[in-house]
Image (cartoon, helix red, strand yellow):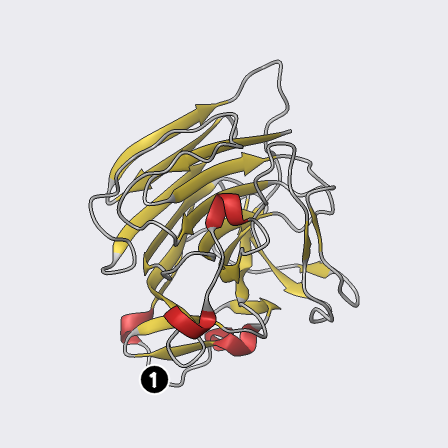
Amino acid sequence: MFRLLTLAALVTLAFAQDHQDDVTTTTTGSPTQTTSSLACTPWAVDFTKQADGTSPFSLGFYDSWCGKNTYIKGGNLVLQLDTECGPNIASAIQFQQGRVDVTLETGWSAGVVTACSLLSTDPLKDEIDLEWVGQDMVHGQRDPRASQAVLLDIGGDSSAQMHSYAIEYRSDSITWFVNGKSVRTVTKDPSDPFLDQPLQVHLGLWDASAYPDWAGTINYSKYSVNGTFLAHVQSVGITPFVCDNYTTVVPSATPTASPLVTATATGVPPAR
């Protein structure tokens, strides 16, 4: 089952459970959970305190796809989308219940989607999404394919300045926050399956031109800067609510092909 919620300018809020048919990633091997000595304390990365050229993979992330298109510059983690690929990097830490905070400036342009997604490593993936669709950064839009949609103005152009976002994941509810304000809560329905797997934080920037009705189509020749689109992340962190499954998960191999994305039952693509 896939439920979609939409947050303006245009931010897509979504969660899904056990949707094996939604995303297929071709890899050599699969992620391997490792026994960790992590204390049950928050993990956070403030990119404003990192030197230019620092590798994000030295700060607790791993390369989920196209990690070469990420770098740290000017106090930000830069996500770079070009005609070859768009990046997706993941926290090595996973958590069973907790809060994820991220401060970022999104990419801009039709077809460009910035994403902060919480994904499990299990083949039957649980997923919680924050996605910013770049074809209208000021006005909320209703996705005609979304069966459940909520529009909300985030208070400015998400590609022109930093905004803070958060997701609280509990055993019986999911709550999204924008600039410190709770904007949407979904509670567990006893008659409906609910997410129950530990999740990792994924940060990505991807080309959604295959879904023009939802995201628009990228025009690299007209709108890109030197053939690229950029998103900037200032900080990201995880605060665990429980210590169960608060561990590190490392990939046994890097991807050998781009994730294959198919539309969900609502017609809206899942996170990249």
Label 1 sits on residue: 52
- The x, y position of residue 202, in whole percent, is 51, 57
Badge 1 crowding class, 10 Å Cα cut-off, few under 14, some 14 to 19, many 20 or more, is: some
118 sits left or right of 53 in the view: right
- The x, y position of residue 212, in whole percent, is 52, 49
Does 175 appear above or below 250? above
Q: Label 1's element?
A: loop
Of all residues, the one furthest to the left in this rendering is 155
Residue 74 appears in view: yes
Most foreground residue, 83 or 117: 83
Residue at the (51%, 31%) spot, across then down: 146
The quarter of the rendered structure image containing the C terminus is bottom right
Most foreground residue, 10 or 77: 10
Does 83 appear above or below 134? below
57 sits left or right of 254 in the view: left
Does 217 appear above or below 144? below
Residue 246 appears in view: no
Residue at the (54%, 67%) spot, across then down: 86
Displayed quadrant of residue 8: top left
Of all residues, the one furthest to the front in this rendering is 222
Kind of residue indicated by mark 1: Asp
- The x, y position of residue 217, in whole percent, is 49, 57
Residue at the (59%, 35%) spot, across then down: 16
